[in-house]
Amino acid sequence: MDKISAIVPCYNEEQALPYLYEELVKVAQQMNGQDFEFIFVNDGSKDKTLQVIKELRKKDDRVRYVSFSRNFGKEAAIYAGLEAATGDYVAMLDADLQDPPHLLVEMYESLKTEDFDCVATRREDRKGEPIIRSFFAKQFYQLINKISDTEIVDGARDFRLMSRAMVNSILQVGEYNRFSKGIFGWVGFNTKWIAYENVERVAGETKWSFWGLFFYSLEGIIAFSTRPLAIASVFGFVFFLISLVWICMIITKTLLWGDPVPGYPSLICAIFFIGGIQLLCLGILGQYLSKTYLETKKRPIYIAKETETTA
């Protein structure tokens, strides 16, 4: 008998949790030869998420939980869940049922019968998602796969089932600034991908805004590529060459034709343009420096206020 741990990061998901629990129970009944534990990670929710989890715990001892002292973010919740999991196989899925739990049956069969360490999911489409968000999401996956050595599949979800060996490898990556999609690819292991149609939330509202996703994508780029630093250096070199050519042209025109140096408007445009490039390059450097600064602090990835054993 194998033990399967299902990790569910939760932030203000009091409405969705009962539906998710029912689906997880159905899956456990369908896979009645396996042992299960359901690990809910309360990421500093401001609603009754923790109370709902405790009620589920009272009627089902397979329910376990970790409750943070404040909101540390989904990446911290994923890491906490992986640390708490005791199963031979570990699954991660969202609380809103956009990750269909019934796929766990197929995922488990693939791990047992085929030579894979992980079965992951990706969306076939982005039906129901705002057009602008879908466009920028596609651009992000194209960009990061060009500038990073770690492959990140377009439409990849955090929803996956992993072997204990892969989970242990992920836990060895103890960096503070985490981007799990990249970490999953970086640690390696054989991964099978299952595609499915996008599913709407069962209840509640998404916690991800456009700008939240934008800054999260920057986290991924900075965490898994140093190419932006090289691009900043290229910018500097190119504009140095342009300035040399421009200076030579002005000197030549003045000596041969006696032209005064004209162009107040062009001068202002040049100053603003080059100044903007400089600020962009400084911003890129600052992002990497800030991440390094946070890593050197050695702060914990999360702080657990309560678990099912300490309540």
Image (tube, rainbow, N blue to C red):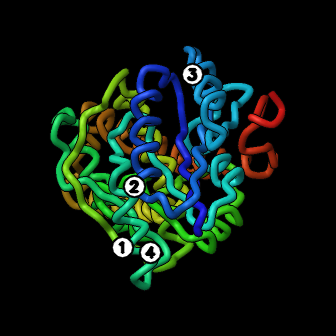
Q: Which residue is mark 2?
A: 30
How far, Cα to Cα, is label 3 from label 2?
24 Å
Q: Mark 4 or mark 3, which is nearer the start of the sequence?
A: 3
Please tell me how crowded label 1 is: few (under 14), some (14-19), or many (20+) other residues with Cα within 10 Å: some
Answer yes or no: do the residues labelled 3 and 4 have beta carbons within 8 Å? Answer: no
Q: Which residue is mark 3?
A: 52
Q: Mark 4 or mark 1, which is nearer the start of the sequence?
A: 4
Q: Mark 2 or mark 3, which is nearer the start of the sequence?
A: 2
Label 3 sits on a secondary structure element that is helix
Question: Which amino acid type is marked by label 3?
Answer: Val
Is residue 241 in view from this perspective? no
Q: Mark 3 or mark 1, which is nearer the start of the sequence?
A: 3
Give the x, y percent position of residue 240. 42, 61
Is residue 182 in view from this perspective? yes
* Residue at the bottom extreme, as displayed: 115
Question: Which amino acid type is marked by label 4?
Answer: Leu
Q: Nearer the viewer, residue 227 or 280?
A: 227
Left or right placement of residue 106 versus residue 306 in this view: left
Left or right placement of residue 216 versus residue 61 in this view: left
The mark closer to the camera, 1 or 3, is 3
Give the x, y percent position of residue 161. 47, 62
Residue ID at (74%, 26%): 69
Q: Which residue is mark 4?
A: 111
Please tell me how crowded label 2 is: few (under 14), some (14-19), or many (20+) other residues with Cα within 10 Å: few
Q: Mark 4 or mark 2, which is nearer the start of the sequence?
A: 2
Label 1 sits on a secondary structure element that is strand
Left or right placement of residue 79 versus residue 98 in this view: right
Question: Which amino acid type is marked by label 2?
Answer: Gln
Give the x, y percent position of residue 72. 64, 34
Q: How many marks?
A: 4
How far, Cα to Cα, is label 1 from label 2?
22 Å
